[in-house]
Image: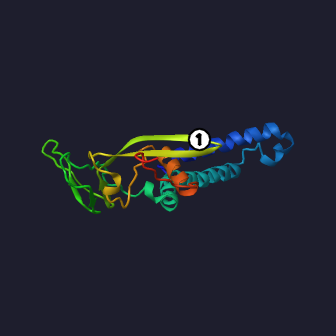
């Protein structure tokens, strides 16, 4: 009862307050509430009702975090599951490298630069297809209510054509903005009508 006293007093005040409100708005029903009666039995009934409702209120307040966590675990478990440290890593060939393509397999160990003699270790979560190319331009154009997403790729090696790189698969990073990246992914998966690949060296 000691831990419940706050809830009990709050519920008791609420019952008396609502009784006053009810009497003012419905004066004809006042006799049914025994408003002027000092009967201790009626007071005990009100107090017992306050005890019961205060315990319910206290249980709800104490268990709402657990209820909310259970609901989130069902609806969006990714918000409550522990998330390890993540980083975004850029891979590129050295300037004098003779390689044109390279596959970095999933699970490759990567070490960070030492910070106060502490080195962090990470692992890649999917296969990375690395080519000697870079994105030189990205823009969106529209015509007749149709939108075109233009992506220009540039070969980083002189006198090397893109057809010589052995392209098999290109992974695109859509950015760290959740709304923008989700929107781009939605349009690519659901609204893409046509995909064209054009060489700027030809007409």
Q: Which residue is mark 1?
A: 142
The residue sitting at 84% across, 45% down in the picture is 29
Q: Is residue 97 left or right of residue 40?
A: left
Please identify the quarter of the rendering in which residue 108 is found: bottom left
The residue sitting at 40% across, 46% down in the picture is 201
Label 1 element class: strand
The residue sitting at 48% across, 53% down in the picture is 65
Colour scheme used in the picture?
rainbow
Q: Residue furthest right?
A: 28
Residue nearest the viewer, comparing 190 with 202: 202
Residue nearest the viewer, comparing 188 with 167: 167
The residue sitting at 35% across, 56% down in the picture is 163
Q: Is residue 89 left or right of residue 146?
A: left
Q: Position of residue 192 (x, y in %)?
A: 56, 54
Residue nearest the viewer, comparing 12 with 147: 147
Q: Is residue 136 above or below residue 168?
A: above
Q: Position of residue 16 (x, y in %)?
A: 68, 41
Look at the image and tell me whether residue 4 can be seen.
no
Q: Is residue 133 left or right of residue 18?
A: left
């Amino acid at each position: 009862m000691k831990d419940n006293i706050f809830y009990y007093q709050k519920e008791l005040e609420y019952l008396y307050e609502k009784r006053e409100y009810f009497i003012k708005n419905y004066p004809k029903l006042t006799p049914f509430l025994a408003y002027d009666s000092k009967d201790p039995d009626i007071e005990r009934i009100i107090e017992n009702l306050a005890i019961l409702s205060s315990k319910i209120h206290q249980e709800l307040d104490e268990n709402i975090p657990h209820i909310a966590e259970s609901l989130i675990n069902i609806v969006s478990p990714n918000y409550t599951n522990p998330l390890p440290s993540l980083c975004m890593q850029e891979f590129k060939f050295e300037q004098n490298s003779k390689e044109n393509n390279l596959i970095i397999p999933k699970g490759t160990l990567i070490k960070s630069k030492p910070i106060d003699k502490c080195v962090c270790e990470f692992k890649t979560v999917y296969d990375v297809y690395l080519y000697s190319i870079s994105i030189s331009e990205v823009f969106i154009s529209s015509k007749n209510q149709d939108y075109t997403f233009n992506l220009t790729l540039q070969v980083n090696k002189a006198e090397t054509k893109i057809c010589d790189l052995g392209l098999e698969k290109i992974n695109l990073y859509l950015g760290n903005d959740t709304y923008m990246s989700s929107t781009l992914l939605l349009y690519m998966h659901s609204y893409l009508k046509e995909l064209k690949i054009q060489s700027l060296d030809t007409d």
